Amino acid sequence: MCLAIPCKVVEIIEEDGEKYAIAEYKGVKQKAKLTLLDKEVKIGDYILIHTGYALEVLSEEDAKLSLEAWEELFKALEEMEQ
């Protein structure tokens, strides 16, 4: 099982004939190959990334719901550590 946090696409680049998204979550940027997606990715879209590949494009609403759930989890884990 893999867990992925939605990342916001901030740049689209092309290298060696392949398209990549540069996506960001909390200031951390990562590059994701777009070849597995069947729809066009635009700057501002949210994507799920696993092992360097974008696996899914999320609606903004779904991304926000997922990000809220992640924040709740992080907060609960932080409280458990105290």
Image (cartoon, helix red, strand yellow):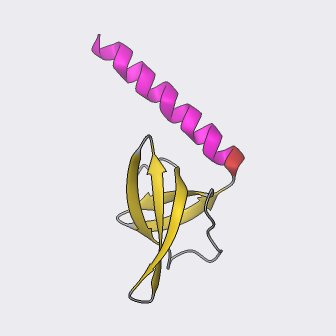
Q: Residue furthest top?
A: 82
Which residue is painted at 49% across and 29% down in the image? 71
Q: Is residue 70 magenta?
A: yes
| Res. 82 in view | yes
Where is the C terminus found, in terms of image quarters?
top left
Against 69, is 17 above or below? below
x%, y% of residue 55?
Answer: 51, 66
The span shown in magenta is 62-82
Which residue is painted at 44% across and 89% down in the image? 17
Which residue is painted at 64% across and 74% down in the image? 40
Magenta: main secondary structure: helix
| Res. 1 in view | no
x%, y% of residue 24?
Answer: 46, 51
> On the rendered structure, is 23 left or right of 40?
left
Against 66, is 58 above or below? below
x%, y% of residue 12?
Answer: 52, 70
Which residue is painted at 52% across and 64% down in the image? 11
Against 10, is 28 above or below? above
**Quadrant hosting residue 43:** bottom right
x%, y% of residue 29?
Answer: 39, 53
Q: Residue furthest left?
A: 81
Q: Is residue 24 magenta?
A: no
> On the rendered structure, is 32 left or right of 6?
left
Query: 3 and 45: which one is in front?
Result: 45
